[in-house]
């Protein structure tokens, strides 16, 4: 299916099944394909309507050939909301991986009543540190000069560094998807992530269930930092589980992730 957006034009998305809507939002330089290994769980339950979206310039979604665009998390959240409105979905569970989590939080800021629950899969409610902002903006030069090298450098960091040799198939899969991403989109989202606002208040002040999934070997969002975030929030609606993975539980250890999500599923349902 497609949504024709005024600016980004064609947005690709898929819907499967009937029942409780569950929205899966992928991360930076990913696509709806990255959910393939956990989809059988939701399909087998036969009680979910699964909404899979290719964010602008990712997967089969279009992105204009322009370097001057900043795609903020707020701007992207509007696109997701348009799709849900088009499909008459007014309540849903959200699972957002990394950047998909940032977008989910922006959606929750606009419409908290839409949420049955939120899973932040290797994601944070904090904004970028000054150092992280500098790294994102500096990365734009490498994207322009040598995009394959940028992809190599970044995708390798997403996986448990102790297991790179045995995760080559998974790494190749994620790199293939990343290389298909529009360079213009990559630059635009790097800018957009660097300017995103702190959303801790969304976690603290909303009553729907929240779940953090933390990778014990995550080089992007270190587990010590993430556990401090959950402790600081100190909310009975917010839980966390950790997995023996890097930043890609849905690809690295789909069975471990499914086990955690099945517990979350029972809380929500």
Image: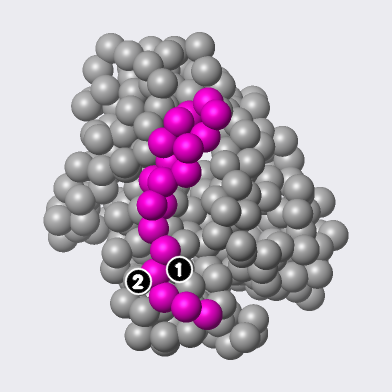
Q: Give residue 240's position: percent from left, percent from top.
A: 61, 70
Q: Secondary structure at mark 1?
A: strand
- How many neighbours does mark 2 have within 10 angstroms: few (below 14), some (14-19), or many (20 or more)? some
Choose mark 1 or mark 2, whichever is in front. 1
User: Which residue corresponds to the image point at 29% horizontal and 68% vertical from the top-left?
Assistant: 37
Residue lying farthest to the right in this orientation: 205
Vertical side of 31 occupied by 84: above or below? below
Residue 39: mark in rendering: 2
Magenta residues (range): 1-19
Vertical side of 75 occupied by 147: above or below? above
Q: Nearer the viewer, residue 213 or 195?
A: 195
Q: Main secondary structure of the magenta part?
A: strand
Residue 246: in sight, yes or no?
no
Q: Give residue 5's position: percent from left, percent from top.
A: 52, 34
Which residue is under mark 1?
50
Residue 148 location, quadrant: top left
- How many neighbours does mark 1 have within 10 angstroms: few (below 14), some (14-19), or many (20 or more)? many
User: Which residue corresponds to the image point at 39% horizontal and 69% vertical from the top-left?
Assistant: 16
Q: Give residue 40's position: percent from left, percent from top.
A: 32, 77
């Amino acid at each position: 299916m497609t949504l024709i957006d005024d600016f980004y034009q064609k947005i690709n998305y898929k819907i499967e099944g009937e029942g409780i809507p569950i929205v899966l939002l992928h991360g930076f330089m990913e696509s709806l394909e990255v959910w393939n290994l956990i989809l059988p769980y939701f399909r087998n339950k036969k009680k979910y309507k699964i909404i899979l979206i290719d964010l602008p310039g990712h997967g089969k979604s279009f992105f204009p050939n322009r370097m001057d665009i900043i795609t903020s998390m707020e701007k992207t959240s509007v696109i997701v909301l348009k799709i849900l409105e088009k499909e008459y979905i007014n309540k849903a569970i959200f699972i957002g991986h990394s950047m998909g989590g940032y977008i989910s939080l922006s959606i929750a800021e606009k419409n908290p009543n839409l949420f049955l629950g939120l899973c932040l899969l290797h994601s944070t409610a904090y904004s970028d540190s000054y150092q992280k902002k500098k790294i994102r903006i500096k990365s734009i030069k490498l994207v322009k000069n040598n995009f394959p090298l940028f992809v190599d450098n970044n995708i390798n960091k997403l996986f448990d560094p102790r297991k790179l040799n045995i995760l080559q198939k998974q790494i190749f899969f994620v790199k293939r998807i990343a290389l298909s991403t529009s360079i213009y989109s990559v630059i635009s989202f790097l800018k957009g992530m660097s300017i995103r606002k702190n959303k801790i208040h969304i976690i603290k002040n909303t009553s729907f269930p929240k779940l953090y999934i933390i990778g014990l070997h995550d080089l992007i969002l270190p587990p010590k930092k993430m556990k401090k975030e959950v402790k600081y929030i100190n909310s009975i609606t917010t839980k966390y589980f950790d997995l023996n993975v890097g930043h890609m539980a849905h690809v690295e250890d789909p069975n471990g992730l499914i086990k955690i999500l099945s517990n979350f599923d029972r809380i929500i349902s």
